[in-house]
Structure formats: structure tokens, C-alpha cells
Amino acid sequence: MAHDGHRERTKERFLAEGLKSFAPHNILELLLFFVIPRRDTNTTAHELMDTFGSLSNVFDAPYEELLKVRGVGKSAALLIKLIPALSSAYLNDKVDVGIQLDNSDSLGKFLLPKYIGQTKEQVYMICLDNKCKLLHYKMISQGSFNSASLNLRDFVEFALRCSASAVVVSHNHPHGFAIPSEQDLTVTRKLQEVLRPFDIRLLDHIIVARDDFVSLADSGFFAQVPQ
């Protein structure tokens, strides 16, 4: 019964303070209360931290790897994978169409939530009006940012449907750094070329890696390429 008392005290502590005073293993312990009703979850929380090294690594771990941790069943693994997906959906839902995305800082803040918990490369396209206000955005492709996997016609069609004056493209490096590869630069040039006949400007290409991002516009890349 002392075990039940600990759970109630932990829940009350969260309601009173939020998670700011919780250690990472305490956060996992609290989360696991809801799928492991009759067993101490503190030990499992420590096992998860010991296995993956950090709270974010636990949430980013593949479902199959989570199942290998002692004490983690299918329901617990599913709940853990649900957290980054919910976080991304929540943050994305707070973004309103019509916000101004006219610099790399605003673009980075807009795009980073899209990639929370993603372990595969995803390519997003943002359509803007002539004042850099958001018209629409969507994930164009999932896989990799290269000429073989991308259909550049999809970018043009989406931009035309949105009546965009300008667009921004973004993709992530889920297992590396936010550093553009030569392939990234080549595809960016090709995308500029296919958009140019329609008087649609490619304003930037944002590359994301975890909580970091790089803007090709800020790096001077677009100044080197004829617009």
C-alpha cells in the first residue's frame, strides 16, 4: 500500500509543480504508472535510462529496441513512442496560418517541432505569400533528400495550388549534423531551376538535426546561385 501512496504523491507533485523538479528517470516512472499498474516502475525507468543514456534517447528509440528492456511490454513501448508524436502534434497545432516566416529564426522555430522524434528523413515544403506569410505547408516526401527519391514536379504543383510567391524547403538529418551535403546543394539548385519559370522564389533551405538547424540562405548559398 505504501507503493500506492508513492504513486499518488508523485501525481500530486506533478499537478503542483509540473515536471521542472523531476529527474529524467522520475518522468519515465510517472509515465509508466499508466501502463504498469501493479509493479514498481522506478526500476524499469532506470533500466531505460541506463540502456539509452538520456530521456530524449528513450523517446527516440525504436519500438523494437524498447521491447528489449526488462520490464517494458508492448503497451509501455507504445506509450513511450506516443510521447514525441503527441509533442509534435501539439506544437504544430499551435501554429496559425498567416504567421510571418521572413527569417531563419522564425523558420527554425516553425520547423523544429515537425521533426520531433523522427528517425527517417522527411522533406517539408512551406508556401508563402509575397509578404512571407504562411499559406500552407506539407510533408512532400519521406526517405531521403536526393534526386532519385524526390519528384521535383510535386514541389511545383504544390506551390501553384497554394498560389505561392515564395517557398522554403526543409529536410532533416536524423542521425547526423545539420550540415548540408553536396547532394543537398545539388537538389536545392535543381529546385530553384524548376520553380524559376513560374516566378516562384526559393527563399531558403533549412536543414534540421535534432534541436539544431542550418539555413542555406544565411550561409550565403543563394547569393552564389542566380535567382
Image: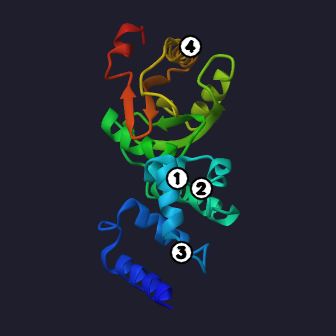
What x and y, as percent, mark residue 139?
60, 39
Residue pushed farthest bottom?
Answer: 1
Amino acid type, label 3: Asp
Left or right: residue 143 compared with residue 193: right
Secondary structure at badge 3 equals loop
Cβ atoms at labels 1 and 3 below 8 Å apart? no
Look at the numbered discs 2 and 1 and tell me whether their residues touch, using CB distance below 8 Å. Answer: yes
Q: Amino acid at mark 4?
A: Lys
Which numbered disc flags the more N-terminal residue, 4 or 1? 1
> Which residue occupies 59% across, 56% down?
81
Q: Residues within 10 Å of mark 2 (few under 14, many from 20)?
A: some
Secondary structure under the numbered disc 2 in the rendered image: helix
Residue tagged 1? 59
Residue for badge 4: 190
Q: Residue at horizontal 51%, vertical 13%?
A: 189
Q: Residues within 10 Å of mark 3 (few under 14, many from 20)?
A: some
Q: Which residue is mark 3?
A: 40
